[in-house]
Amino acid sequence: VVAKNNYGWNSLHVAFGRGARASFDVVSKLIEVGGKDVVMAENIDDRNPIEIAVQNIEVHTDILDLLIQYEGQEALTKVNRQGKTLFDIVITSHSGGRMRALLVERTAFFITKGIELRVGGEYDIGGLFNSHREQEQKDEMYARWDEVVCPALEQVMTLPKSHHQPLLQAAIISNAPPHIIKTIVRRFPDTIKTADS
């Protein structure tokens, strides 16, 4: 289970590779046998199984959740060679047709998980406004704001744990562009009244 091939891929990397469709039960068993070592192992490109899984749209969020349980907050804050977190990888994925709905769902999942694991501070909104994010990643996120991020936020902000997030304050503190702030005010008017801690 933890043995690697010439590319540094273990059984979990392979389970999430292109075209792979490992079930929750199979992934659970691989993790049960291999433990944290199989989850955290990096291949020769420094990519661990969760990064491979995120790039495979066929991998369901229940499996991503299982992987994050083993890595915790580190899974959501780790930066790859391209300077991207898992959240950055998700929002910059291709999003045509049916893929857009899946991408929005996955983006909402990562924002919700980030809030749950308290990624960043109060004003990071689960890593959405990560103050350590490179400008290039911020620009990519802002370019996908209306298409992917806002629909995901609409899902997130309806959840009881997320309803009172200081979204507008977070955008202002992170120096979000004016059109992002205007969109937040227009689409999330309740955030104007949200008090910070």
Image: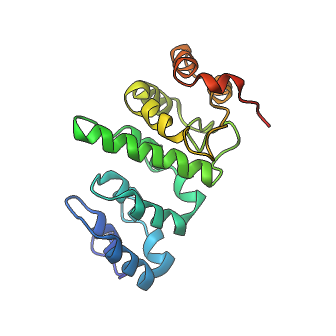
Residue at position x 46%, y 66% from top?
67
Residue at far left of view: 19
Front-most of residues 81 and 92: 92
Residue at position x 46%, y 67% from top?
66
Tell me residue 113's x, y (percent): 54, 52
Tell me residue 93's x, y (percent): 33, 40
22 to the left or right of 82: left
Q: Is residue 82 above or below residue 51?
A: above
Tell me residue 83's x, y (percent): 48, 43
Tell me residue 12's x, y (percent): 34, 71
172 to the left or right of 85: right
Residue 84 in view in this figure: no
Front-most of residues 59 and 4: 59
Residue 93 in view in this figure: yes
Q: How is colour applied across the structure in the image?
A: rainbow
Q: Is residue 81 above or below residue 135?
A: below
Residue at position x 44%, y 82% from top?
32
188 to the left or right of 21: right
